[in-house]
Image (cartoon, coloured by chain):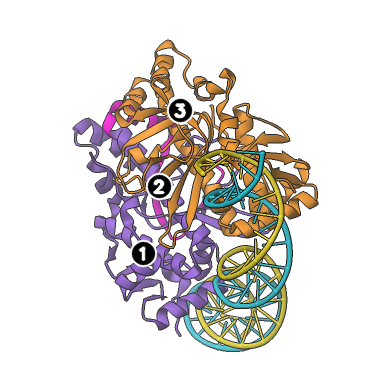
Chain colours: A orange, B purple, C yellow, D cyan
Amino acid sequence: MKQGPAASRGKQLHTTNSRQADAFARRLDRFAPTIAEKSALADFRSARHAVSRRKELVHESHSAPVAYVLHDGWMCSYKRLPDGGRQIINIQLPGDFVGLNSLFLQTSDQSVEALTDVVVSEVSRSQMISAMQQSPRLTEAVLWSFARDEAIVAQHLVNLGRRSALGRIAHFLLELGYRLNEVELATPTRYECPLSQQLLADALGLTSIHLNRVLRYLRERELLVFSAGRVELLNRAALIQLADFDPSYLEADTR
Amino acid sequence: MKQGPAASRGKQLHTTNSRQADAFARRLDRFAPTIAEKSALADFRSARHAVSRRKELVHESHSAPVAYVLHDGWMCSYKRLPDGGRQIINIQLPGDFVGLNSLFLQTSDQSVEALTDVVVSEVSRSQMISAMQQSPRLTEAVLWSFARDEAIVAQHLVNLGRRSALGRIAHFLLELGYRLNEVELATPTRYECPLSQQLLADALGLTSIHLNRVLRYLRERELLVFSAGRVELLNRAALIQLADFDPSYLEADTR
DNA sequence: CGGGTGCTTGAGCTGTATCAACGTCTGTGG
DNA sequence: CCACAGACGTTGATACAGCTCAAGCACCCG
């Protein structure tokens, strides 16, 4: 079977149109109806710069109190282990904050890496705090981001602790699809996915070898295809059941 | 070998002296030096009430936008799976917030249960937000709590994804000891631990049977003893190496 | 005294890891 | 334009950590 041109994946996502470039704005604007609030958010969007694929933005245990807004491309946060392995904690997609934690912990205990070429803007702790002083709604918006990040990580914890490789993979890929759909980068059955099998394995606590076998199984049963930098959900209903997927943990409470 | 009287463990911790009862205050006071700030925090401490062991405080998917400050006793948050199993996300100790997330997500997607008899006070979303409006330092204090919670969960994720049962257990019990020591409920080599083996197993993504065997191994090597509601770290240095334990992810950045 | 809860141990099985080899595509430099 | 190096993906053989099923024990509480 043909495999995707891995080295070119970064570029696929980098050629983004303006619709996607404001994922962050669209996501948080509903929390910020007034002019003043909008301008505070605009600060978060200024000073964009590009970072190229493979670059480490925050190095583990090198205390760097800075976070980012990710405008375009994919990133991930992870921890390395003494035996050389690594565990990916979370994948960040356009519109997400990156490294919010590291603003408040002594050591930003996670590393962050660009998985594709990427566009980000920096956010400092003081920017963050002063935006929150300005309006309760912005406070809510930021707390929601924190809560959602934790909910995602908690869900991954359940995946690793209590689900088989099969269920994990299905759950993870459904979650990615759902999150990409929120920022209009996915259809219900398909999305571009620049992750290598090794990377997916690092996220799911598996060997890339075993991951490969389970992906084959999923393909043969015509449940999903992960190939050529693209994910196709052939039988969404069956996958959802297999993975026990319920996206409500991703949604904000907007009361 | 003798096992601890499980049913009486709840009471052990409940007979708490006043020193421990202000774990929350001591922990957050350093963020709140002024009178006004202290009084805002005092709100979080008022209206205490007791909850007895085994009681579920927040039920999964039953949207209850309320969080708690845990003053005394142990709690845990977890998710149930369709096959009846469960995964514990985090253990809450005196001084911790409980269910901060559920204030901002549509469904409090986790359940929360009292592991011992417990004393808590409720915190509403509006209380939270208005305290944060009042002072940047309180904002920092709350954000730090969020960040720390996520750091703990991320660390557990690494445990489940990439460490052997042995390493996981050692890491988890060292972390508990460290956190208890922060609120003066542990000495460097010993602490009271009301968790059953089944519960520990649910936290670590293991079977209680396998957990039991590894605990025996740890006991036979004279590394640690988990028994009779108490944990004794017999050879802390060896455990730290075994678990690759580095507590810096638990510490606040107080710049 | 009887039943529940938690702990312990054994025997056998299975999901996932490890080790090893090979294929395929991409980008690079002669 | 070809040769090569380097990622990434695929497959097979084998080993082992951790699971399942099953049984029994110790203690507590009603």
Which numbered disc, 1 or 2, marks the residue closer to the eye? 2
Report the chain holding disc 1: B
- Give neighbour class at mark 2: few <14, some 14-19, many 20+ (Cα, 10 Å): many
Say which amino acid is labelled 1: Leu
User: Which x, y percent locates residue B184?
Assistant: 26, 59
Cα separation, mark 3 vs mark 2, equals 23 Å
**Labels 1 and 3 share a subunit:** no
- Give neighbour class at mark 1: few <14, some 14-19, many 20+ (Cα, 10 Å): many
- Where are the magenta residues, as a range? B108-137
Say which amino acid is labelled 3: Ala
Look at 35% across and 20% down and name the residue there: A134
Residue to which mark 1 is pinned = B174
Q: Is residue B94 magenta?
A: no
Q: Is residue A101 visible?
A: yes
Question: Disc 2 on helix, strand or loop?
Answer: loop
Please tell me which residue lies in front, A53 or A100.
Answer: A53
Look at 54% across and 27% down and name the residue there: A254
Q: Residue furthest top?
A: A35
Residue to which mark 3 is pinned = A141
Which numbered disc, 3 or 2, marks the residue closer to the eye? 2
Indicate whether A41 appears above or below B96.
Answer: above
Cα separation, mark 1 vs mark 3, equals 35 Å
Res. A110 mark: 2
Question: Disc 1 on helix, strand or loop?
Answer: helix
Report the chain holding disc 2: A
Q: Quadrant of the N terminus of chain B?
A: bottom left
User: Which x, y percent locates residue B177?
Assistant: 34, 63
Indicate whether B126 appears above or below B15.
Answer: above
